[in-house]
């Protein structure tokens, strides 16, 4: 897997965790005339460009699996606070 | 369309716009031992719960189209700063 990979990570406040930013956006939407919105949660959207290094070889599938493990580690260690946030990611070649 | 609709909005800095938060995350990922990440952009992920009001009727498709127009208006007026950010959304019933 020598080519560039794009990863899209979404991080959202967990259910049950207070989300003051979401409350603020909800209030603003109502003030702007959108009463149909009943709940808002605000999280982060992170796009990463990844160029796997020195992992080339015949086993593309294994290389991708290993890179996705590393991406999961990035989420847990930096991108999301797993005590209060959920994350998910998807990758594209 | 009387049922609840969920909308997921992603907002990202436009190409060419400075993204200091993305730079900071990139630096932290390198410091944590992820040199394969070559670019990061940080945006927002917003989930909305929508309960369309008084728009019930036989024409579900038209009602959904109208609600998506309203969602687009929410993005342009509040959720994204279209001078420097791109947005996209998807809806699910």
Image: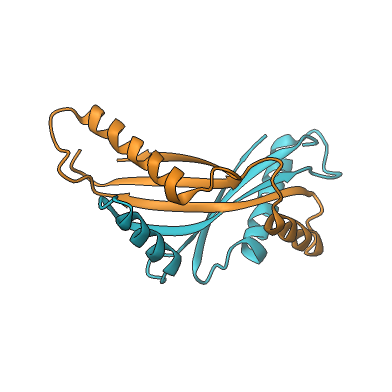
Chain colours: A orange, B cyan
Looking at the image, can residue B19 be seen?
no
Q: Residue at x 77, y 34 (%)?
A: B3
Counting labels gives 0
In the displayed structure image, the side of residue A65 where residue B24 appears, left or right: right
Q: Is residue A26 above or below residue A52?
A: below
For residue B81, what is the image quadrant? bottom right
* Residue B9, percent from left and from top: 58, 50
Quarter in which the C terminus of chain A is drawn:
top left
Residue closer to the observer: A58 or B35: B35
Determine the residue positioned at 71% across, 57% down.
Answer: A20
- In depth, the one of B8 and A48 nearer the eye is A48
Q: Is residue B44 left or right of residue A47?
A: right
Relative side of A10 to B34, left or right: right
Residue B54, image x and y in percent?
86, 44
Left or right: residue B67 compared with residue A12 = right
Tell me, yes or no, if residue B16 can be seen here: yes
The structure residue drawn at horizontal position 25% and vertical position 50%, both measured from the top left corner, is B36
Q: Position of residue B25 (x, y in %)?
A: 40, 59
| Quadrant of image for the N terminus of chain A | top left
x and y, in percent, of residue B88 in the image: 53, 52
User: Residue drawn at (52%, 72%), measured in percent from left and top?
Assistant: B83
> Which of the two residues, B27 or A64, is positioned nearer the viewer here?
B27
- Give the farthest residue toward the right: B54
């Amino acid at each position: 897997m020598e080519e560039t990979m794009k990863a899209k990570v979404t991080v959202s406040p967990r259910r049950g965790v207070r989300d003051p930013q979401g409350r603020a956006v909800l209030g603003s939407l109502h003030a702007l005339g959108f009463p149909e919105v009943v709940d808002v949660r605000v999280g982060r959207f992170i796009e990463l460009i990844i160029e796997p290094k020195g992992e080339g070889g015949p086993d593309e599938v294994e290389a991708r699996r290993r890179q996705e493990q590393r991406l999961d580690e990035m989420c847990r260690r930096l991108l999301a606070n797993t005590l209060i946030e959920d994350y998910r990611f998807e990758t594209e070649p």
